[in-house]
């Protein structure tokens, strides 16, 4: 039996952001599911909170574990921070972790500053939809831009997310993760400030940097991102099948 992959999206997007990865994994016969976090996608009418987001990951892992194999967990941006936080206490339930576009340790002062900015943008007549659309069209080539917006734009979650991220300590959480961790960042990502610190915190970790990619690495360079994911997934599964993990 093949271990399933769980994909967790970033801020204001939804499960649809993983369309290209889901199609490729399906073609390879690898089962995968992309979930929606509270306040996003099919759950866009809900409020976002940390407990609810971690519960969504926990439920997905529980469901995927019915396959008889420990699932492989993938998170990007917000989803990456949440995946690290969840794995810090439950890594025995997964076979590996890929954390993308989350290479900066959350700082309360910075997050609070962003909250002030986000609240200002939220006073726009369109609640910031025009700015979001402009940024996506400018920095994400087709068809990735359409995938980002296909599940709806979660305009109401910014303040909740930035507030709920404040207590996270990814360095501490990573030190508790007992399975292999792969960090994937775009070369042009502005969230790479502490990537080496995070890399050093994990017991068994590697870093892949994708040239020409910005923060939205999985839609800007989908082929390269998916290749890194599949390579690491297959490495981990092969090592588990052999009874040990290769370094």
Image (tube, rainbow, N blue to C red):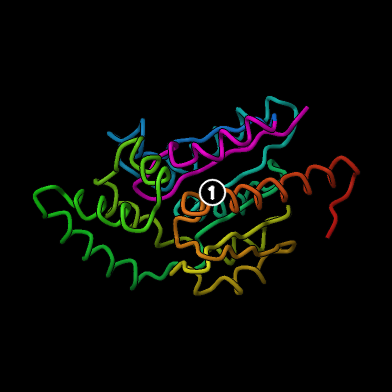
The crowding category of the residue bearing disc 1, from other C-alpha atoms within 10 Å (few below 14, some 14 to 19, many at least 20), is: some
Task: Answer with left or right where residue 210 lies relative to residue 162.
Answer: right
The percent position of residue 194, horizontal first and vertical second, equals 53, 73
- In the image shown, does 205 or 84 lie closer to the viewer? 205
Where does the image place residue 69, in percent across and percent down from the top left? 74, 32
- Residue labelled with disc 1: 222
Q: Which quadrant: the C terminus? A: bottom right
Is 4 contained in the magenta span? yes
Q: Residue at x 49, y 74 (%)?
A: 193
Q: Estimate the x, y position of residue 145 in percent, counting from the top left.
A: 37, 46
Q: Is residue 70 left or right of residue 122?
A: right
- Identify the secondary structure beneath mark 1: helix
Residue 233 visible in the displayed image? yes
Residue at (51% x, 50% y) in the render: 218
Q: Left or right? Give the position of 223 relative to 56.
A: right
Residue 105 seen from this side? no
| Highlighted range, magenta | 1-28
């Amino acid at each position: 039996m093949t271990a399933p992959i769980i994909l967790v999206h970033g801020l204001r997007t939804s499960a649809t952001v993983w369309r290209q990865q889901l199609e490729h994994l399906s073609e390879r016969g690898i089962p995968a599911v992309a979930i929606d976090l509270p306040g996003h996608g099919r759950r866009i009418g809900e409020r976002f909170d940390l407990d609810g987001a971690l519960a969504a990951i926990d439920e997905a892992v529980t469901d995927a574990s019915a396959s008889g194999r420990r699932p492989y967990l993938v998170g990007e941006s917000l989803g990456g921070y949440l995946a690290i936080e969840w794995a810090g206490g439950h890594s025995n339930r997964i076979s590996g972790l890929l954390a993308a576009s989350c290479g900066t340790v959350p700082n309360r002062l910075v997050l609070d500053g962003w909250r002030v900015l986000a609240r200002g943008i939220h006073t726009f007549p369109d609640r910031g939809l025009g700015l979001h659309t402009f940024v996506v069209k400018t920095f994400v080539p087709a068809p990735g831009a359409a995938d980002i917006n296909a599940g709806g734009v979660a305009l109401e979650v910014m303040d909740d997310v930035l507030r709920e991220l404040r207590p996270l300590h990814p360095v501490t959480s990573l030190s508790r993760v007992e399975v292999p961790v792969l960090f994937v960042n775009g070369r042009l990502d502005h969230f790479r400030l502490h990537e080496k610190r995070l890399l050093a915190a994990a017991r068994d970790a590697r870093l892949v940097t994708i040239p020409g990619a910005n923060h939205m690495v999985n839609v800007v360079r989908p082929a390269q991102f998916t290749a890194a994911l599949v390579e690491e997934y297959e490495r981990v599964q092969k090592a588990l099948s052999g009874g040990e993990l290769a370094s």
